[in-house]
Image (cartoon, rainbow, N blue to C red):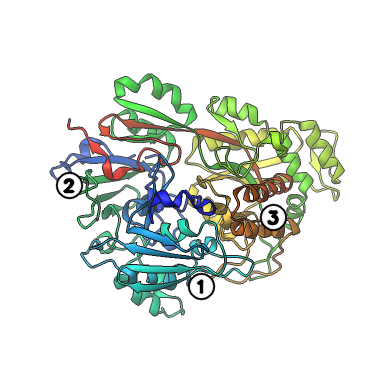
Amino acid sequence: MTAAIFSKIPLITVIRRSLLLLLSLLVTIGLGGCSRNQLKTSAAQVPQIVLASPNDPSTFNSPLNDSLFSNIVFGLTQSGMLSINGETAELEPRLAKSWEISPDSKRIVFTLREGLKWSDGEPLTADDVVFSFRDVYLNEKIPTGVRDILRIGDTGQFPSVRKVDDRRVEFTVPEPFAPFLVYSGGIAILPAHILQESIEQTDANGDLLFLSKWGTDTNPKDIIVSGLYTIESYTPGQRLVFLRNPNYWRKDAQGNQQPYIERIVVQIIGSDDSQLLSFRSGDLDEISVKPEQFQLLKTEEERGQYSIYNGGPESGSRFVGFNLNKAKDANGQPFVDPIKSRWFNTVEFRQAVAYAIDRERMKDTIFQGLGELQNSPLDSQNPFYMPPEAGLKVYDHNPEKAKQLLQQAGFKYNDFGQLFDSDNNRVRFVMLVKSEELSRVRVATQIQQDLEAIGMKVDLQIISFNTVIQKLMQRRWEAYVGGFGGGGIDPQSGYNIWASQGSLHQFNQGPLPGEPPITGWEVTDWEREIDRLFTEGVKELDKEKRQAIYWEFQQLVQEQLPFVHLVNPLSLEAVRDRIENVKFTSLGGAFWNLYELKITPN
């Protein structure tokens, strides 16, 4: 079965862009580093591009990844059985040359390409596929978010997988599951001959050796991959260098090895301003254009020999969220001050925050008008998006409405306009924001000002992205300004965010495998209802009925507001004109077709 036949199966017309960075090579994070002249050594005289990232990778072990930057690493080095065309959003063969779906949509058989090899020259076979799913992704001893999205139905069962022969693998599900094809085909395949032993053995603490396998202290040349590139070297805080995988399967129509670009350098550059400076000086070949940078870069476009591509609103989300977790840690200490927890768990409090934030001003000033207001957990390009015209609840700027809601909930004001709760506690809390993105810091600053106008005192904590992630994982936070990458065109892509048991259910994170026990964790009725809606959504095969389910989901989220959504900026990317065959889209960015990009000789 080919991608053309896939288009005839409506229940599986879904894409999880954030997961499928591994397939579609969405290497579109702001990209930067040391001077290009420094890179032009004798070893660097090969076709190459220089990109940048604000953060170091947290691991080279993709199932354990919790870092946005590492998606670049895995997008370059790993492969699933299928990939996504960045222009058409159709599934295409990758490691698998074809697939067949049973009439009841409960069984898929993938047939791998002939002669597939790992980067070390060893054969890549059905055994690797079975190992990846059965022994890694579905292994309860391994804390990976991939397992969340593979849960099926009310019982949370998982797909079964078996080897048919060396080139064929069969996946089976107990009931219809809408994203079945995308998920089974899209997840990166891992080398059994390298990793099997780490699954079978434990350390002195009883943990699988796999949990410490392929950390960033591993010699990159020992990391075996199936993707377009291998990791040549990694210098923490400075750069990664990738070289073309000599055993990658893809060739062009003339039999030439792809990708054509032999070398990719990813520089670690922490701030937007530093990345901009590096790009303007010619040291970078690509940069994600922030709204505040657009006018300057546009005026220099011709002289700088680059083009700025506009893909429309980003397929992601930006929001302010509150920690609704009532649980206590292993020592019996609450993760959130109980006084503040009562505020955050009051829906009128969250709705008041939404009414207080002037998102139109945010769009016009911080984003220079280059964006749109976001009123839903789904972006407006999503086919399941519920528009306000259909009845979706919207929070237009209305500080007086915000004050009314707070007073109805028992809050009160003193003579100076300061907000107190019914027990005379001043409403004051800490809001985290990552330091690396200037526009996000400005968003947090405006939110601080807007909430001050309704009597709240907000203390901003501007810290590194990795520190923010650490605090979120530890549940040691009160509020934060954050965002999620594009979720593709199916709501199920956000399952691990919205499901009460999900590994990214940040606003009320439940127990996770391998961590110390927590007590007193509570799931609200509305969270359970979201669980039910997601369960029903993946079972439903009729697109209109699925849409009705996800409209109900969006209405519920907008009523309860675990996240207050803000502004979606435009997807803008500047790319050097010397890079040929760029086919920019909001779905895939500039490098979804990296395998066919070429460099114009200087």
Q: Residues within 10 Å of mark 2 (few under 14, many from 20)?
A: few
Residue at (53% x, 42% y) in the render:
316
Q: Secondary structure at mark 3?
A: loop
- Checking the image for residue 324, the label placed there is 3
* Percent x, y of residue 120: 22, 64
Task: Say left or right for 226 vs 528.
Answer: left
Q: Amino acid at mark 2?
A: Asn
* Percent x, y of residue 555: 71, 45
Q: Quadrant of residue 393?
A: top right
Sequence order check: which comes first, mark 2 or mark 3? 2
Task: Say left or right for 535 vs 425.
Answer: left
Q: Amino acid at mark 1?
A: Glu
Q: Quadrant of residue 79?
A: bottom left
Contact (Cβ within 8 Å) of mark 1 with mark 2 = no
Q: Residues within 10 Å of mark 3 (few under 14, many from 20)?
A: many
Q: Which residue is mark 1?
A: 140
Task: Say left or right for 85 vs 323.
Answer: left
Q: Secondary structure at mark 1?
A: loop
* Percent x, y of residue 136: 43, 70
Residue at (46% x, 58% y) in the render:
181
- Checking the image for residue 256, the label placed there is 2
**Front residue of 405 and 451:** 405
- Checking the image for residue 506, the label placed there is none
Residue at (23% x, 43% y) in the render:
261
Q: Quadrant of residue 275?
A: top left
**Front residue of 537 and 418:** 537
How far is disc 1 from disc 2 in space, using C-alphas?
43 Å
Task: Say left or right for 104 vs 557.
Answer: left
